[in-house]
DNA sequence: GAGACCATTGCCCGATTGGCGGAGCCTGTC
DNA sequence: GACAGGCTCCGCCAATCGGGCAATGGTCTC
């Protein structure tokens, strides 16, 4: 029996790489490639027999977290494994919060990628060793005070919605425009922005954009 | 006769990808991998019979441009081809100025990657179609007016004063703050900003910051 | 010297931004 | 069921932003 995977990444060579690595691992893989989230979602909806989707978070056009949500919404049974060039803990946590079943940094050695995939296909959740486990999207609040009190602003505490808004902000759009794109009132957008400013510890939209880029949230 | 290549990238799956893609292209390739610039340079110096090195600019530890110079210095005969996730023109030009023999965006389809490699191995220089050629680091000043009037906004037409203001803008400062730093009136700053917006063809300060960074004016 | 370009500033205007408080709804957790 | 947190919306208000029109002085070129 062969495992059917959907690989979504905008870098052809990387898709090539993961395909050949998996095929060389011994097991029988059937791998379909997509260059962006929209194409991937269409493929996944079209033929619903994929065993998993490997999704790059840094995709042009659609923010990775939004893409995760979209996949989870349209194909709830399909496990989504995130592959990211940014391997910091907060990115991983956000991905899991958004519904991902695993988070694999691109710097992971090939054998461990295979391992991680098998873990997820078996119904489990994979996290890289650099990310402390045990905080699978719920127990974060419980621990009284971890060890991140005064350090950098944590993108991890941004809501999914806030990240979506921040994404549009990072395109230089105005409040009215963002509101129209989301079908929200302008006031709601402002509320989100205020919250974003607080989390990122900035005082205006331009600084928010710079902070977002510094944290690798929206590369361009 | 086989071509011996050195692939330097911190993502194992990507190295895997380029290796398998090249090997599948028909020709006989001998591919050695390195995870960072230091390791790559050691390998290149150790056995000087490489035909080319494929270098990712986004490497941890050593800046990509520094890595190019280092390679050129230690192994002057070895053509360095840059592979980058950032495919804008200014990055490509900077890479060529630093001594690279080619610039391949990671979003390039596999067949064209092969093609580009052959071009470089034949002694040529490869640039992606999105980057207008003909300006190989020297002919920029000579040609009276190339053919870039309607295409991208030219940072060159920005006044010195405007660039100074843009610099502060790119730090997320407000008009009042910028005015105070320069000892100007707020109105003057606004006038400069309006002019900057026109040149960059944007409509607000956030977009101006993004445009400036896209052009490599103020990187962070 | 005329003309062109740049930097500077003023006043005025509308549009946008950002923050204040409050409110309802929904989804979790305890 | 109470409670917290997230998302949505409302009104109100001050500050900021962005532009239009006009003016002064400087430098540089033709």
Image (cartoon, coloured by chain):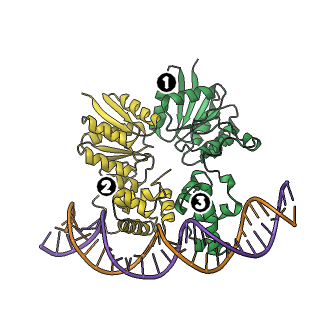
Chain colours: A yellow, B green, C orange, D purple
Residue closest to the eye, A216 or A180: A180
In the rendered image, the quadrant that contains the C terminus of chain B is bottom right
Using the rendered image, report if marks 1 and 3 lie on a common chain. yes
Residue under label 1, please give it.
B23
Quarter of the image where one finds residue A123: top left
Q: Nearer the viewer, mark 3 or mark 2?
A: 3
Residue at the (30%, 57%) spot, across then down: A135
Residue under label 3, please give it.
B197
What is the x, y in percent for residue B66? 64, 46
**Mark 3 Cα-neighbour bin, 10 Å: few <14, some 14–19, many ≥20:** some
Residue closest to the eye, A12 or A60: A60
Considering the numbered disc 3 on the image, is that residue within a helix, a strand or a loop? helix
What is the x, y in percent for residue A11? 46, 38
Question: Is residue B145 visible to the viewer in this orientation of the structure?
Answer: yes
State yes or no: discs 1 and 3 in contact (Cβ < 8 Å). no
Q: Given the image, what chain letter belongs to the residue carrying mark 2?
A: A
Residue under label 2, please give it.
A97
Q: Given the image, what chain letter belongs to the residue carrying mark 3?
A: B
């Amino acid at each position: 029996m062969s495992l059917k995977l959907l690989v979504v990444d905008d870098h052809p060579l990387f898709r090539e790489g993961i395909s050949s690595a998996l095929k060389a691992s011994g097991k029988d893989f059937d791998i379909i490639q997509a260059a962006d989230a929209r194409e991937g979602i269409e493929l996944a909806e079209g033929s619903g027999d994929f065993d998993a989707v490997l999704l790059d978070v840094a995709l042009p056009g659609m923010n990775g977290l939004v893409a995760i949500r979209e996949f989870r919404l349209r194909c709830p049974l399909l496990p989504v494994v995130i592959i990211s060039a940014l391997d910091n803990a907060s990115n991983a946590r956000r991905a899991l919060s958004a519904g991902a079943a695993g988070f694999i940094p691109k710097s992971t050695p090939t054998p461990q990628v295979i391992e991680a995939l098998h873990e997820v296909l078996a119904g489990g959740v994979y996290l890289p060793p650099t990310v402390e486990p045990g905080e699978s999207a719920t127990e974060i609040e419980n621990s009284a005070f971890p060890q991140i009190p005064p350090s950098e602003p944590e993108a991890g505490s941004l809501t999914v919605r806030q990240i979506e808004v921040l994404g549009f902000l990072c395109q230089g759009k105005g409040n009215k425009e963002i509101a129209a794109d989301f079908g929200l009132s302008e006031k709601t957008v402002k509320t989100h922005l205020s919250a974003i400013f607080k989390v990122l510890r900035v005082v205006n939209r331009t600084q928010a954009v710079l902070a977002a880029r510094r944290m690798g949230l929206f590369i361009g």
